[in-house]
Amino acid sequence: MLASVVSIEPRPDFFGYVHGNTVAFAGWVAISWLVGGFSEELLFRGFLLSKIGRMFRSPVIGMVAGLTAQALLFGSLHVYSGAFGFAFATITGVISGAVYLLNGRNLWPLIVAHGAWDSFGMYGLYR
């Protein structure tokens, strides 16, 4: 339903050279794990969600504000993919933030999931 409202860009043009290029694919998988998997999860879920949440007296309001803010910022980082990419990343940010909170603030499952997701996407560009 959301896809019918916004335009979908399956891959940004700057990733076109990855198709069939094993060296580029391996490089982007490494970048995906370091930047996407580790750094983004550490920044958005581990740092921002907690930091924003502590700005409020009410723990519930803080949690909702932190969850919302980090998800919107995470989505804005993916706006290069168009409106659909922004919306998808924002929704993913909300889900990831909720999993982080419900899982005792453990980032490792999110790091692995994010790295695997980005690697899968890179593989799609490679093939």
Image (cartoon, rainbow, N blue to C red):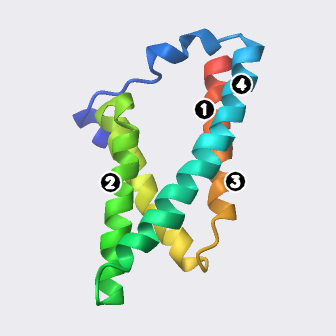
Q: Which mark is residue 112?
A: 3
Q: Which mark is residue 10?
A: none
Where disc 3 sits, the SS reads helix
Label 1–label 4 contact, CB within 8 A = no
Q: Please tell me which residue is depicted at 41% across the width and 62% down the height of the picture.
A: 94
- Where is 12 relative to 17, above or below? below
Q: Please tell me which residue is depicted at 54% across the width and 66% down the height of the picture.
A: 46
Disc 1 from disc 4: Cα separation: 13 Å
- Where is 76 relative to 96, above or below? above
- Residue topped by disc 1: 121
Disc 3 from disc 2: Cα separation: 21 Å
- Tell me if mark 2 has few (under 14), some (14-19) or many (20+) residues whose alpha carbon lies within 10 angstroms of its own: some
- Tell me if mark 3 has few (under 14), some (14-19) or many (20+) residues whose alpha carbon lies within 10 angstroms of its own: some
- Image quarter of the C terminus: top right
Between 90 and 47, the one lying in front of the other is 47
Q: Earlier in the sequence, mark 4 or mark 3?
A: 4
Q: Earlier in the sequence, mark 3 or mark 1?
A: 3
Camera-near label (3 vs 1) is 3
- Tell me if mark 4 has few (under 14), some (14-19) or many (20+) residues whose alpha carbon lies within 10 angstroms of its own: few
- Tell me if mark 1 has few (under 14), some (14-19) or many (20+) residues whose alpha carbon lies within 10 angstroms of its own: some
Task: Residue 67 in the image: state x and y as whole percent.
Answer: 38, 68
Q: Earlier in the sequence, mark 3 or mark 2?
A: 2
Label 2–label 1 contact, CB within 8 A = no
Disc 3 from disc 1: Cα separation: 14 Å
Q: Earlier in the sequence, mark 1 or mark 4?
A: 4
Task: Residue 82 in the image: state x and y as whole percent.
Answer: 32, 30
Where disc 2 sits, the SS reads helix
Disc 4 from disc 3: Cα separation: 18 Å
Task: Residue 84 in the image: state x and y as whole percent.
Answer: 33, 37
Disc 2 from disc 1: Cα separation: 22 Å
